[in-house]
Structures are given as structure tokens and as C-alpha cells.
Amino acid sequence: MAMSGEHDTGGAAAASQDGPPGRSPEPRTDWRDAVPTSGVDQSCAFCGAKAVGWVHPLDPRLVTYRVYGKKHTLPSFWMLCDRCEGIYRAGETETAVELMKEDQKGFWTTTEDVNQKIRQPLAVLKAGRRWRSPPAVNAPHR
């Protein structure tokens, strides 16, 4: 579920369900304040795993950044699996970068691509968190 050629941040899914053509989508009941309360239909922002258990809501005022001069905006949250949550909490940025590169092999072709398209969003994630310890969600596939 990559956004505009960007890495899948795990939170790109909209907070509504598709309805019949011509009707407004029905609101999702498994979301609260634009953040999912379960890991259903989500994936880990770092490695792409489907069994996610951690949600990082982001402050909408702090989620914009530039990639090669073009404005980009992170979604309202990032989801992480248990392994990647540990990496994130330990501040292991290089490990997170390598996981994100591995998840989409060949997409990040240059050092500058990695700096612009992985390191910058990771920095925005850290700066944009709404609270320090994210709540665990009811993760599927456990």
C-alpha cells in the first residue's frame, strides 16, 4: 500500500470502508481519532509484516517534509510489528533503514534516495508522535 511512490508506512489505509457506488463510505468502527484500534488491514511500516501490534499516532501539524523539493505528508499514524517496535524504541535507526530498504528491494537506488525517502520520514515519525509510549492494538495473525 505504498503512497505516491513512497514506502508503505503501514498507515496509508483510509479510515472508512468502501460502500456502493454513489454512496458515502461507511465509517470504520475499528478506528478512533483517525487511528486504528486493531491491526486489521495494516502492515509494519519498517518491514511490511502483517502482524502489527503497535500504533504511533502522529500530530498532523508535524507530518510534512520535502523529498527532492516536493512536499510530502505522512499518514496520521504508523504501525509496527513487535520486532520493529523494539528496534524503534531502542533508537536503532540504521536497522530500521535497512529493514525498509529490504522490504522494497530495488526501489531505493541511491544513497540520496535513502536519505530523502527513508531517513527523512523516520525523522518526521520521531518528531510527530502524539505520545511517547504507543498503545498496543489487537493485532491479527498472532
Image (tube, helix red, strand yellow):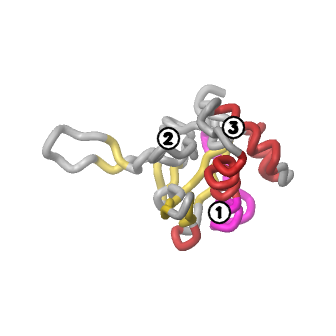
Give the mark nearer the N terminus: 2 vs 1: 2
Instruction: Identify the residue at image location x=68%, y=35%.
Output: 47
Q: Secondary structure at mark 3?
A: helix
Label tally: 3
Provide the secondary structure element on which disc 2 rests: loop
Q: Is residue 25 magenta?
A: no
Q: Which residue is mark 2?
A: 2
Q: Is residue 70 left or right of residue 21?
A: right
What main secondary structure does the magenta stretch of the protein show? loop
Q: Which mark is residue 20?
A: none
Which residue is under mark 3?
101
- SS of the residue at dot 1? helix
How many neighbours does mark 3 have within 10 angstroms: few (below 14), some (14-19), or many (20 or more)?
Answer: some
Give the image quarter of residue 103. Answer: top right
Amino acid residing under circle 2: Ala
Q: Is residue 132 above or below residue 113?
A: below
* Residue 51 visible here: no
Mark 3 and mark 2: Cα distance apart in space: 13 Å
Please name the amino acid that badge 3 sits on.
Answer: Lys
Q: Quadrant of residue 80?
A: top right
What's the mark number on residue 124? 1
Q: Tell me where residue 76 appears, x and y as whole percent.
A: 52, 58
The span picked out in magenta is 123-138
